[in-house]
Image (tube, grey):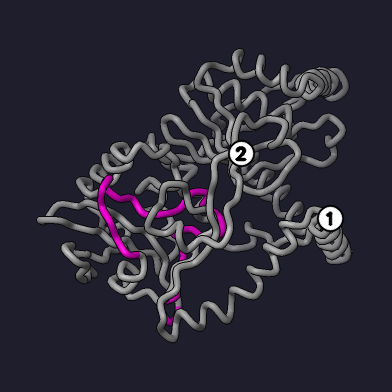
Amino acid sequence: MTQEAELPGKRVLILKPDELSPSDQKMWREIRTESGAPANPFLDPAFTTAVGQVRPAARVAVLQDDGSPVGFFPYERGPLGQGRAIGLGVSDSQGAVLRPGIRLDARRLLRSCALSSWEFDNLEAGQGVFVPHAVEELASPVVDIGEGFERYTQRLRAKSPGFLRQTLAKERRLARQVGEVRFAYDAKDPGALRALMEWKSAQYRRTGRRDRFAQEWITRLVGLLGESEEPECRGVLSVLYAADRPVAAHFGLRSRTVLSWWFPAYDRAYAKYSPGLVLQLRMLQAAAADGVGTVDLGSGPARYKESLKTRDLPVYEGVVVRPVPGGAAHWVSREPARAARRFVRNRPRLAGAAARALEEVGRLRGH
């Protein structure tokens, strides 16, 4: 279903993700490498292709100069041309993949894609085309483990001496009181994955948040990525067992050098042992040994992220809107709610009260 459009000095082909050729995917990765951007799996063509299998409105704009690709812009197109980042809602790194030096106007790019707006909530830093349209900068904590796990734990002890000691003590207590503790970094365990989804769904409901695993496309996407063998974007299921029973698990995405922290959860029956933290330390150790240099914990506040992180990366939330009816419709339908979330998020006491209210809503739903 190839479509063509024009940008000043550029030819634009609009493709479905599965229409990208092997040479397109190779060029996509070469441009990412040339740009010096982190090898985040969410901005790999394999992620866009997987989303395309579960989201029929997924598209990729291929920007060409003299017949050669110089950029790729993945997106999803909704009613009235309202667009969104590919996999919005589960994607932790978003944007366009452009050869260094390519200059574009965001609204002209949207017009060539027949989009009236384009929404993002985890735009990566360095996206000069879209950052001017951001309404908020967020911190995305990361853990640097490229120098090895031992060097990382030395820094962790200096920063949070009690955190590491207490977590290791809880792991020993879990082994004594429940049974032998075993960890699998890249497990092939469908039962553990089902348990993870059940724990995570319960957590979403308990905290009054939308259950992502109640959305079929997300469950299917996780399944597809879990089966992927693509080195630059594949799912990794890590599981902590006690007495051969899963007590905590995490499903993430990894490239050769970046592991994205995506869906973590644990069995609340073992909460006093902090199995989620035990799992995370074991996972950091295994990832460092497997060549991962950075673990991206994703935006959003959490106490454990503050304890584990080595630094923050900026990501951005916002929307590009064209002065057309579809753009106006997006603004009316989405921006008041977005502004309200920002207002709450930037006021810690109010944010705490909102979180408690959501938990109470979740508790009432459970009865």
Specify the amino acid type for callout 1: Arg
Q: Residue at x 22, y 64 (%)?
A: 13
Please indicate whether residue 268 sits to the left or right of residue 283 in the image: right
- Identify the residue at image location x=56%, y=62%: 135
Image height of 209 relative to 280, above or below: below
Badge 2 density bin: few <14, some 14–19, many ≥20, Cα 10 Å: many
The one of 217 and 88 positioned closer to us in this rendering: 88
Q: CA distance from mark 1 to mark 2?
A: 22 Å
Q: Position of residue 301 (x, y in %)?
A: 70, 46
User: Is 143 located above or below residue 297 in the figure?
Assistant: above
From the viewer's perspective, is 8 left or right of 288? left
Q: Secondary structure at mark 2?
A: strand
Residue ID at (52%, 78%): 330
Can you say whether 270 is above or below 51 in the image? above
Q: Magenta includes 81?
A: yes
Residue indicated by mark 1? 349
Q: Which residue is farthest left?
A: 66
Q: Earlier in the sequence, mark 1 or mark 2?
A: 2
Q: Which mark, by number, is residue 141?
A: 2
Q: What x and y, as percent, mark residue 273?
A: 83, 29
Q: Which residues are magenta?
A: 79-105
User: Is residue 339 something one can see in this rendering?
Assistant: yes
Extreme-front residue of the structure:
132
- The N terminus lies in which quarter of the figure? bottom left
Where residue 148 appears, as percent x and y from the top left, is: 54, 16
Expressed as whole percent of the image width and height from the top left, the position of residue 331 reads 54, 78
Magenta region, main secondary structure: loop
> At x 53% / y 63%, what residue is drawn?
318
Q: Nearer the viewer, residue 221 or 259?
A: 259
